[in-house]
Image (spheres, rainbow, N blue to C red):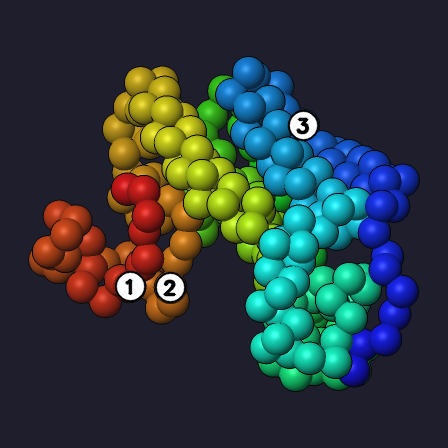
Amino acid sequence: MVEQSPAYGLWGPVMINSAVFILFAFSFFKPRTSRDWRSFGAFSAFLVALFAEMYGFPLTIYLFSGWLQSRYPGIDWFSHDAGHLPEMMLGWRLNPHFGPSHILSFFLIGGAFVLISTAWPVLYQAQHHNRLATAGPYAFVRHPQYVGFVLVMAGFLVQWPTLLTLAMFPVLVGMYVRLSFIEEREARKEFGDAYNRYAARVPAFFRIWPDCSVPPASAVCPDRPGSSPARLNLIFVC
């Protein structure tokens, strides 16, 4: 049972948490172009919406409070801990900060920031020397920074799902996919066949192991000429 006083209307923590995570992401992403700023701005809006419900006004809890109270009696749904909906709905009655979804979110968010932070120096050096970024995370996915942003958002959704952030998530994912198309068109114009060869062996967003690093000359994959049948990739943007 969760027995706590209401813990909302705390707009100071909303601003502080939003600023901390936004500045933390900014220190790694370092947007330069207008396209970078659009993607980073959308990511920042997601974080502000999340923390506004987490500490400011619990819109999702408010709208579903009647159903939640009847379905899960004995829980103070306007306490802060009850905002961890997965733990509450699955019957987790210990500290929700140590619940399974909260721990999973730590791995997703932490791994995402590691990915973003390791991708940025590689991209910076490549741009500085006017060459393709193919080292580090770019050896495994073509858009590691977009993957990082999506993983951060997914981590927060696992930890603290809200109606607004759930609605924003597919929109932002679609925006990142669209931006990746634009970036790849520009890269193909600039690097030509070199980028085509890179894209032929490295998936856009996610890879499922195992992968054949050097396919046989005679091997032909039905969905990509010249690739190995042993190669198993989950590719959202080719």
Point out the tag, 3 or 1, that comes first from the N-terminus: 3
Would you say the residues marked 2 and 1 are in contact, meaning their CB atoms lie under 8 Å apart? yes
Q: Which mark is residue 232?
A: 1
**Badge 2 is on which residue?**
208
The answer, for residue 38, to whether it is visible in the render is: yes
Along the line of sight, the residue nearer the viewer: 63 or 83: 63
**Badge 3 is on which residue?**
30
Coordinates of residue 48 in the picture (x, y in percent): 70, 38
Q: Which mark is residue 12?
A: none
Residue shown at 85%/40% (left/top)? Answer: 11
Q: Label 2 sits on what residue type?
A: Ile
Query: Up-down: is 98 above or below 156?
Result: below
Point out the tag, 2 or 1, that comes first from the N-terminus: 2
Would you say the residues marked 3 and 2 are in contact, meaning their CB atoms lie under 8 Å apart? no
Residue shown at 45%/39% (left/top)? Answer: 171
Secondary structure of the residue carrying numbered label 2: loop
- Looking at the image, residue 170 sits to the left or right of residue 99; the answer is left
Q: Which quadrant does the C terminus fall into?
A: top left
Secondary structure of the residue carrying numbered label 1: loop
Q: Which quadrant does the N terminus fall into?
A: bottom right
**Mark 1 crowd level (few <14, some 14–19, many ≥20, 10 Å Cα):** few
Point out the tag, 3 or 2, that comes first from the N-terminus: 3
Would you say the residues marked 3 and 1 are in contact, meaning their CB atoms lie under 8 Å apart? no
Q: CA distance from mark 3 to mark 2?
A: 29 Å
Q: CA distance from mark 2 to mark 1?
A: 6 Å
**Quarter holding residue 158:** bottom right
**Mark 2 crowd level (few <14, some 14–19, many ≥20, 10 Å Cα):** few
